[in-house]
Image (cartoon, helix red, strand yellow):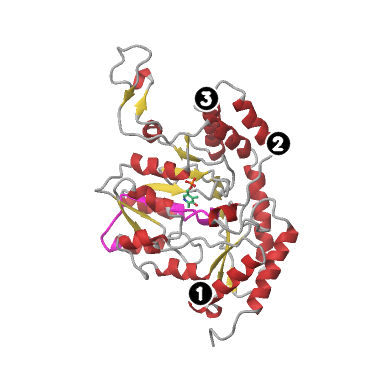
Amino acid sequence: MVIAGSIAGDDREMMIPYGRHEITDADRAAILAVLDSDFITQGPAIERFEEELAQYCGSKHALAVSSATAGLHLAVLAAGADHAKSVWTSPNTFVASANSALYTGARIDFVDINPHTLNLDVEQLRRKLNQGTRPDILIPVHFGGHSADMRAIASIAEQEGMFVIEDAAHAIGGRYLGRAIGNCQFSDVCVFSLHPVKIITSGEGGVITTNNTELYDSMKRLRSHGVVRSPELLHDNTQGSWYYEQQTLGYNYRITDIQAALGASQLGRVDEYVLRRSLLADRYDSLLEGLPLQRPHRSADVSSSWHLYAIVLDQDINPGGAARRFIFDRMRSAGIGVNVHYIPVHTHPFYRDLGFHDGDFPCAEAYYKGAITLPLFPRLTHGEQDFVIRTLRDALSALPRSGHS
Ligand SMILES: *Cc1c(COP(=O)(O)O)cnc(C)c1O
């Protein structure tokens, strides 16, 4: 399956996609074992996967759900979001980060990005707070798998009394200050995606981690209709063993045993995948040296999972985004699944209808005009990578000169 094609809805014959999952014989065996067992959903594979993931991340709890979007929705609900609350996130993200807040009726706003890290900018967060508004919930996004500045964010959140949800959809296998993303040292809740284009997959799926047992219990109840069965949690425990109670309005955000078995099998390879991605990222870094573009930021505090390798064309060769368009089209025509991450969320028609405008978050908008995501996945070969760079270099030297002086 070609991920770039399936997401773009076209170019299915692409030679090199921007991302590609891998399914091994061990994955197949894990799935078949579930299919041959007594449970294909809500069996022991889910709890096993959750335990392994919590152990990998160093969190107290892990809760597997049907997608990261579902996980973000449960997290904002558990944080108490409703129409009276407000949520801030980065504009340089997939729409799900912001949509999850809107599902609850909460108001959404954004904090512009740092042009180097491409993450929510802590200085701009401070400035926005100094203007007198404050969100109840902050959702930093670890763009491309590179952790946001969580230590600073946590200290601001503590001062302001903000709830922090890490959108770590890109970041499983990444590290911050030497510890695995998902340990929740600097947040209340962290959410991973297991969509096939991300680092590891369960088909569709997501996992929430937290160290807060109350939040965990609340999200677990919301995952399955708000229904409770454990005798110690029932309001009325004088009834028979058939008895259950719906205590709140929940959802069906469950994952299946089939998916959890695949997720657990893939989790065993997460470090191998991230290592392979980081070696390829190092190689891109050196192959791109000297070209008129910005390479992904590196920080001593962060070890990225390298979900994305996003370059940014220098503004002086890219007036109005013309060079990005030209290079993107040339690379696509050559069969390279370049992509763009992300269209600033506030510029989508739906968000414009909420009152956002061009110019609201200029750093995210400027980044977007120059951004190109190059293919990066564990099985990308050096030959394919060389072809990507050669095609990019050719496109750069073929840039029409008329657009700038
Ligand atoms: C992919 C993604 C999501 C949503 O993940 P799903 O598992 O597809 O619901 C949320 N946030 C970000 C930043 C993502 O990239």
First in sequence: mark 1 vs mark 3: 3
For the residues labelled 2 and 1, say whether their Cβ atoms are less than 8 Å apart: no
Question: How many marks do you count on the picture?
Answer: 3
Q: At numbered mark 2, what does the secondary structure look like: helix, strand or loop?
A: helix
Q: Where's residue 260, x and y in %?
A: 55, 33
Q: Where's residue 321, x and y in %?
A: 50, 74
Which residue type carries mark 2?
Asp
Instruction: Give the image quarter of residue 391.
Output: bottom right
Which mark is drawn over residue 49?
none
Q: Residue furthest right?
A: 383
Cα gap from disc 1 to disc 3, whole angstroms: 51 Å
First in sequence: mark 2 vs mark 1: 2
Which residue type carries mark 1?
Gly
For the magenta stretch, what is the residue range? 130-151
Which mark is drawn over residue 321?
1
Which residue type carries mark 3?
Gly
Residue at mark 2: 25
Residue at mark 3: 43
Q: At numbered mark 3, what does the secondary structure look like: helix, strand or loop?
A: loop
- Indicate left or right for 216 with 37 as reference: left
- Give 172 or 266, whichever is nearer the viewer: 266
The residue under the point 59% across, 47% down is 199
Say which quadrant the C terminus sits in: bottom right
Q: Is residue 169 above or below residue 369?
A: above
- Give 295 or 57, whichever is nearer the viewer: 295
The residue under the point 38% across, 13% down is 241
Cα gap from disc 3 to disc 2, whole angstroms: 22 Å
